[in-house]
Image (tube, helix red, strand yellow):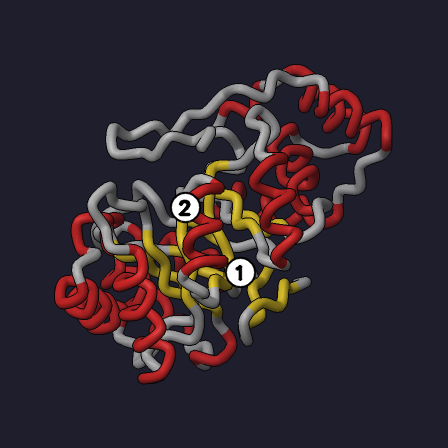
Amino acid sequence: MEALKTQGIDLPRLGFGTFRMPGGGCQPVVESALELGYRHIDTAEMYQNEEAVGAAITASGLARKQLHLTTKVWHENLAQDALRRALDASLAKLGVDYVDLYMVHWPSRDMDLGAVMETMQGFLQSGTVRSIGVCNFNVTMLRKAIEEVGAPIACHQIEYHAFLDQSKMLNYLREKGIPLVAYAPLAQGRAASDPVLQAIGTKHGATAAQVALAWLLEQDGVAVIPKAQRRESQKSNLDALAVKLDDEDRHAIAALPKNHRFVTPPFAPEWDA
C-alpha cells in the first residue's frame, strides 16, 4: 500500500472509514477490514465507536506500529481543557498510548484557532499524538492555521468525490505539500449507480465504485477513506488500487456535475471563503 509522507507519518492512501457505525457492531467490521489488509483506520469521538475500533485492533494481533490510527475531536470540545479531556477519553476508549493523527473534526465559529493549535502541538510534544490535522476547514481557515498560526498540519480531511469540485482546495494544499484525505469518496453510495462511472467500469472490468476510488487515488497527494460494512465491499474497495484509468475516462469524469455537496450540517463553514 502506497503511503503519503507528511509531518513525520506515513499515511496509507486507502484507509477505512467508520462513520455511522456506532457501538459494538463496529468491531467485527473493523476486524474484517484489518484481516483484508487495511492499515489506516479512521474514527472520531462523535462516531461513538472508538471502543469497538480499539477492541478490533487488539483482536487483530497487529503490532501498534503496523497501523495508522486517526481520531478527531468534536467542534464542541475545542476549548483547551475540553480538548485535553477529549484526547484522554479517546485514547482510553481506543486502548492505545497514542494516535497517529489527531484532527479537529469541524471548525467552531467561536474557536480560538491559535489556542487550539497550541494545545494540539502540546500533544505532539507529549507523544500522545504523532501528527495533527484539520477537517472541514475552508481555504481561508486553512490558510490562517498554516500561515498565521504556523501549525504543522499533516493533512486536511474534506468531502471529495467525482461530483464535487475541490480544485481550489487541492491547489492550495499542493502548494503547501499537505495531503487531502477524501471522505465520502463514493458520494455516500451514489457513485455506484452513476451511469458514466458504470460505463467506465464495464470497460475495465470494474465496478462504478472502484472507478470513483481509482479516480481519487490517481490524484497527487490524495488519500481516501471509504466506509464499507460488508466484507465483499471492503475487498472491492481495496481492489480499486489495481484499476487504471485512461484519458478518455478522465474526460468523462471531468464532465460530470461537480457541484454536489452531500455533507451540509448547520455548523459547516462558508465553503467558498
Query: SS for tag 2?
Result: helix
Q: Which residue is mark 1?
A: 38
The residue lying toward the viewer, choosing from 220 and 248, is 220
Residue at 65% x, 51% y is 174
**Pointer 1 local density, CA inside 10 Å: few below 14, some 14–19, many at least 20:** many
Q: CA distance from mark 1 to mark 2?
A: 31 Å
Q: Which residue appears at 65% of the width and 37% of the height?
A: 210
Q: Report the residue at 23% width, 68% height from top.
A: 87
Q: Position of residue 155 (x, y in %)?
A: 51, 57
Where, quadrant-wise, is the C terminus in this rendering?
Answer: top left
Q: Which residue is mark 2?
A: 141
Callout 1: SS? loop
Residue 106 at least partly seen: yes
**What's under tag 2, amino acid-wise?**
Met
Q: Is residue 76 left or right of residue 95?
A: left
Q: Earlier in the sequence, mark 1 or mark 2?
A: 1
Quadrant, the N terminus: bottom right
Q: Is residue 254 left or right of residue 97?
A: right
Q: Position of residue 240 (x, y in %)?
A: 67, 44
